Amino acid sequence: MATVAIFSEADRDSMHVRQADEAFCVGPGPAARSYLNIPNIISTALITNCDAIHPGYGFLAENARFAEICADHGLTFIGPKPSVIALMGDKATAKRVVREAGVATTPGSGILDSIEEAQHAAGSIGYPLLLKATAGGGGRGMRVVNAENELARAYAGATAEAEASFKDGRVYLERLIREPRHIEVQVLGDEFGNIVHLGERDCSVQKPAHQKIVEETPAPNLSLRARDALHDMALQASRYVGYTNAGTLEFLVSGDEAYFMEMNTRIQVEHPVTEMVFNIDLVKEQIRIAAGEPLGYTQSDLMSRGHAIECRINAEDPRNNFAPAAGTVSKLVFPGGPGIRVDTHLYAGATIPPYYDSMIAKVVAFGDTRDVAIARMERALRETLVEGVNTTIAICLEILASSAFRSGRYDVELIPARILTNGEVSAR
């Protein structure tokens, strides 16, 4: 298939621009004027005679209106139907829908229209709470609220960040479950009613801003009962809404109890670990499904093998609360060898702009066992060299070496939200 890449002025020299068959600029650096500029994107697709648009995993990937506009212009949106995106891409609505499907959810509110509504809902739910952007992702528009006197400031910050990131400032509240595991289930559905899951991923290793940094599959130390329950709930909810294409249902897990948190109606950043253990190209499957092809396999045909771990390499300074570190990459070496995969747009001399997410690469390690995958990942990270900007390579190595991660008995509090006096981030 021939491909057309879109890019902003800030990404003019990006790797994807070089590798695509054609590439067109859709605006200046700020996302609102380029990657969120729907008229420019649609115009580019029409001018180049595209048949379909793959929205990736950011910006407009979960925008139901964008999916509708694609259809209005004869373009196939590679993802679920707009009506399903509206249902499940909106986090507050998704919780109501899955409850109707019989899936357990964390106690929470509907969409909040004012700080007064937030205060009333908080009083009913009880503290501590999470304020979450209904159109959010990547930890943006999310705030922890421990007490009533923190709510107003958190509400203002969350709505402003959500508006800036997604052009949708709506937020809702849910009860904060202390020290849970964050486990998600990958699903695929075709246009003929066939739907399968491709196991679960443990995404509990997160930065203080609730952004994932290390993911693995299968989830370690998860009972068979809990694993089966997660898979069953994911399929139950997906069938209830008639889900098609790739999607991920995210759960908070405490012991054997699991609560639906949200659904991502798109491909996930961490999809490579699932691809490694199932030997399935999820993006290829997305395109096949969008083209009207059946899955061609059933749940019993899907068998996972081994273990896979992904470390996100971000241009950030862990010593400064993971502050983004834009700049120019002066030297670059990525690892190779058995079981190692690197997904990146980076090259020596590339400039990392300040406008977008700070992730610059994903390093994935596969092994027949979890211990082998960890050992390969440690070797791969030590071989990785990125000069010119600060990165998260060192903190990823520290996480892998921690006793909590080694034992597979960790939760979302593995990385504490504090910087130690020596300037290092500690992985408990």
Image (spheres, rainbow, N blue to C red):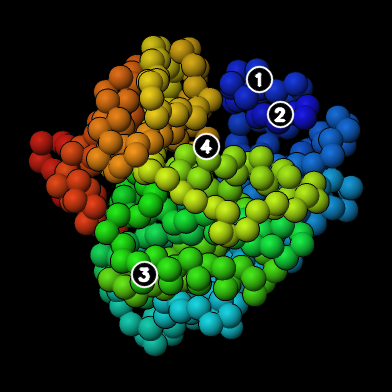
In the rendered structure, the answer to whether residue 208 lies left or right of residue 312 reads: left
**Residue at the location (28% across, 71% down)?**
255
- The earlier-in-sequence mark between 2 and 1 is 2
- Which one is closest to the eye, mark 2 or mark 4? 2
In the rendered structure, the answer to whether residue 412 lies left or right of residue 418 reads: right
Question: On the image, which quarter does residue 367 sit in?
Answer: top left
Separation of disc 1 and disc 4 at Cα? 20 Å
Of the 4 image quadrants, the one containing the N terminus is top right
In the rendered structure, the answer to whether residue 291 lies left or right of residue 314 reads: right
**Residue at the location (77% across, 62% down)?**
192
Read off the residue under disc 3: 226
In the rendered view, would you say 369 is above or below 170? Answer: above
Residue 204's spot in the image, x, y percent?
33, 55
Q: Residues within 10 Å of mark 1 (few under 14, many from 20)?
A: few
Read off the residue under disc 4: 356
- The earlier-in-sequence mark between 1 and 4 is 1
In the rendered view, would you say 120 is above or below 407? Answer: below
Q: Residues within 10 Å of mark 4 (few under 14, many from 20)?
A: some
Q: SS for tag 2?
A: strand
Q: SS for tag 1?
A: helix
| Disc 1 residue type (three-letter) | Gln
In the rendered structure, the answer to whether residue 369 lies left or right of residue 189 reads: left
Separation of disc 2 and disc 4 at Cα? 17 Å
Read off the residue under disc 2: 5
Contact (Cβ within 8 Å) of mark 2 with mark 1: yes
- Which one is closest to the eye, mark 1 or mark 4? 1
- The earlier-in-sequence mark between 2 and 4 is 2
